[in-house]
Amino acid sequence: MAPLLMPSIHATLSDVVLIIVLANTIAYTLVGTATVFIRLLRRYSEQLAFQFAGYLLLLAMAAYSYYDTIQKLQKP
């Protein structure tokens, strides 16, 4: 029944392991970032915590911009 639902997906064991590792890495990164944000919010000030969140947002925007530029340069 599974091939009827997704007939075009043929994942090998290494693909599944890679997906699990990437999902785990993303989850740990999100939890770690949230932990740092909460610690900054509790120990120091609200301003410092939101400044940290702003820097993370800028970093994410820069990473996406870099990724988008690389994708555009690779197109023929």
Image (cartoon, grey):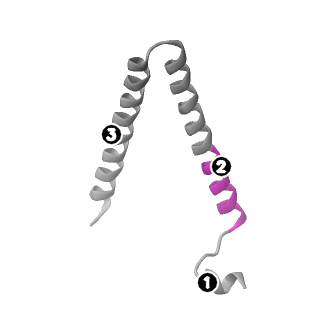
Closer to the N terminus: mark 2 or mark 1? 1
Q: Where is residue 15? Give x, y as percent.
A: 65, 62
22 part of magenta stretch: yes
The crowding category of the residue bearing disc 3, from other C-alpha atoms within 10 Å (few below 14, some 14 to 19, many at least 20), is few
Q: Measure how far apart labels 2 and 3 are at the Cα level.
A: 24 Å
Gap in angstroms between the C-alphas marked 3 and 1: 37 Å
Q: Amino acid at mark 1?
A: Pro
Would residue 12 be found to the left or right of residue 63 on screen? right
Label at residue 62: 3
Residue sitting farthest toward the top: 44
Q: Residue at x 36, y 30 (%)?
A: 54
Q: Of the residues under marks 3 and 1, which one precedes in the sequence?
A: 1
Q: What is the three-letter code of the residue carrying label 2?
A: Val
Tell me the crowding category of disc 2: few under 14, some 14 to 19, or many 20 or more residues within 10 angstroms, Cα based: few
Q: Residue at x 30, y 46 (%)?
A: 65
Q: Is residue 8 above or below residue 11?
A: below
Residue 55 percent across, percent down from the top left: 37, 28
Of the numbered discs in the image, which one, if any, rests on residue 21? 2
The part of the chain drawn in magenta is 12-24
Q: What amino acid is at disc 3?
A: Ala
Residue 57 locus on image (x, y percent): 37, 36
- Give SS at disc 1: loop
Q: Is residue 61 left or right of residue 27?
A: left
**Tag 3, which secondary structure?**
helix
Q: Which residue is mark 1?
A: 7
Give the spatial CA distance, label 2 vs label 1: 24 Å
- Which residue occupies the foreground of this view, 38 or 30? 38
